[in-house]
Image (tube, rainbow, N blue to C red):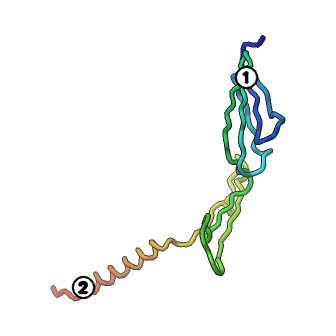
């Protein structure tokens, strides 16, 4: 008769476990073997009396290149022709940094353009009114 709990790990709906260990468990989950997207880690534990406990842990894998899109947002209602800017870049590895393509260019926000116009207008007003004052 065993005294420890036995922990069994499953990924998604796969009936074949990825591992079965006596508790406590230290385990390295290699996500490089999983497709990008949503997954669920299912942890099943059985104690020495045969009672079972289950815990589901949803997680998202993103090992592939990151994809950034400007010009279309999630669930946005659109019509006509959409100008899109799409950037996809990989993370490289843990030892090197990839400079090319690692940043996503973005258009200038509308509030910044309005702020610059207001600042230039105020500067022009200030200069004109300052020159009009006789000392």
In the foreground, 91 or 11: 11
Question: Could you tell me residue 101's position as x and y percent?
Answer: 68, 63
Which image quadrant is residue 45 in? top right
Task: Name the outermost residue toward the top.
Answer: 1
- Label 1: state its secondary structure: strand
Q: Quadrant of the C terminus?
A: bottom left
Q: Is residue 117 left or right of residue 62?
A: left
Which image quadrant is residue 114 in? bottom left
Q: Is residue 133 left or right of residue 11?
A: left
Q: Is residue 129 left or right of residue 61?
A: left
The residue tagged 2 is 129
Q: Residues within 10 Å of mark 2 (few under 14, many from 20)?
A: few
Question: Could you tell me residue 25's position as x and y percent?
Answer: 71, 26
Question: Could you tell me residue 117's position as x and y percent?
Answer: 41, 79
In the foreground, 70 or 126: 70
What residue is rendered at 70% in x and 46% in y?
Answer: 94
Q: Which callout, 2 or 1, points at the residue further toward the start of the chain?
A: 1
What residue is rendered at 37% in x and 78% in y?
Answer: 118
Task: Name the outermost residue toward the left.
Answer: 135
The residue tagged 1 is 46
- Label 2: state its secondary structure: helix
Q: Residues within 10 Å of mark 1 (few under 14, many from 20)?
A: some
Instruction: Compute the Cα span from label 2 to label 1.
Output: 83 Å
Where 55 falls versus 94 (above or below)? above
Which image quadrant is residue 67 in? bottom right
Where 95 falls versus 88 (above or below)? above
In the foreground, 39 or 65: 39
Residue 36's disc number:
none
Q: Quadrant of the N terminus?
A: top right
Task: Name the outermost residue toward the right.
Answer: 16
């Amino acid at each position: 008769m065993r005294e420890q709990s036995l922990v069994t790990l499953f990924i998604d709906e796969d009936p074949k476990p990825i591992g079965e260990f006596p508790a406590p468990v230290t385990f390295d989950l290699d996500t490089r073997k999983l497709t990008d997207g949503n997954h669920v880690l299912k942890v099943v534990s059985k104690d020495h009396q045969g009672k079972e406990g289950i815990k589901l842990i949803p997680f998202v894998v993103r090992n592939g290149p990151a994809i950034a899109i400007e010009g279309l947002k999630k669930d946005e209602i659109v019509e006509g022709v959409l100008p899109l800017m799409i950037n996809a870049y990989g993370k490289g590895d843990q030892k090197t940094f990839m400079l090319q393509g690692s940043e996503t260019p973005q258009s200038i926000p509308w509030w910044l353009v309005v702020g610059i116009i207001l600042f230039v207008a105020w500067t022009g007003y200030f200069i004109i009114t300052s020159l009009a004052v006789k000392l």
